[in-house]
Amino acid sequence: MRIGRKTAALFLAVFISASAAVPAFASHKVIDKDTYIIETNEDKETTCTYVESGKPVTGWVEDEDENLYYYDHGVMNHGWDKIRGEWYYFDPETGILATNTTVLNYEVDEDGRMIKIREW
């Protein structure tokens, strides 16, 4: 069975428009900003809990400047951490996820995932 030029062009147009709608890298599922509260205690540990239940948050949280953080059982991550099989680097002081950079010879992509170890 042969496909005509118009049919082939239609398939190509559908493919291009569909692939443009899908991001190259899946973004992180961020927890709704209205459902949690972030606090810093006297030990300067930043914690995140759900407003209604008071339970600790585990997941990605985004601030008003679109910086991403990850909380594990309510405690902000710092340094390297393996989350769902992928390695991520969080600033040791701020906890902000590093993206599109090199950290100690490790490259991280736009989603913050470690993608490559650079040779010394």
Image: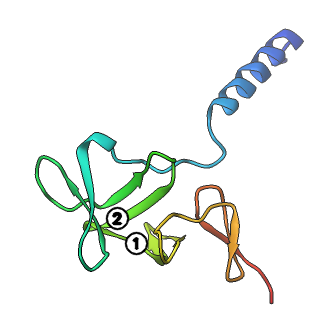
Dividing the picture into quadrants, the one containing residue 113 is: bottom right
Q: Residue furthest right?
A: 5
Vertical side of 52 occupied by 2: above or below = above
Q: Residues within 10 Å of mark 1 (few under 14, many from 20)?
A: many
Residue 110 is situated, as x and y percent measured from the top left of the image, at 64, 55
Q: Is residue 19 left or right of residue 56?
A: right
In primary-sequence order, the first of circles 1 and 2 is 2
Q: Is residue 30 left or right of residue 87?
A: left
What amino acid does circle 2 point to?
A: Tyr
Which residue was labeled with disc 1? 77
What amino acid does circle 1 point to?
A: Asn
Q: CA distance from mark 1 to mark 2?
A: 6 Å
Q: Residues within 10 Å of mark 2 (few under 14, many from 20)?
A: many
Say which mark, if any, is on residue 71.
Answer: 2
Vertical side of 61 occupied by 1: above or below = above
Q: Is residue 24 left or right of residue 92?
A: right
Residue 103 is situated, as x and y percent measured from the top left of the image, at 66, 77
- Check if mark 1's residue and mark 2's residue have beta carbons within 8 Å: yes
Residue 6 is situated, as x and y percent measured from the top left of the image, at 84, 9
Q: Residue at x 51, y 47 (%)?
A: 65
Camera-side residue: 111 or 42?
42
Residue 100 is situated, as x and y percent measured from the top left of the image, at 69, 61
Q: Residue at x 46, y 69 (%)?
A: 95
Judging from the image, what secondary structure is the residue with disc 1 in? loop
Vertical side of 32 occupied by 57: above or below = below
Q: Residue at x 43, y 50 (%)?
A: 63
Q: State the colouring used for the structure image.
A: rainbow
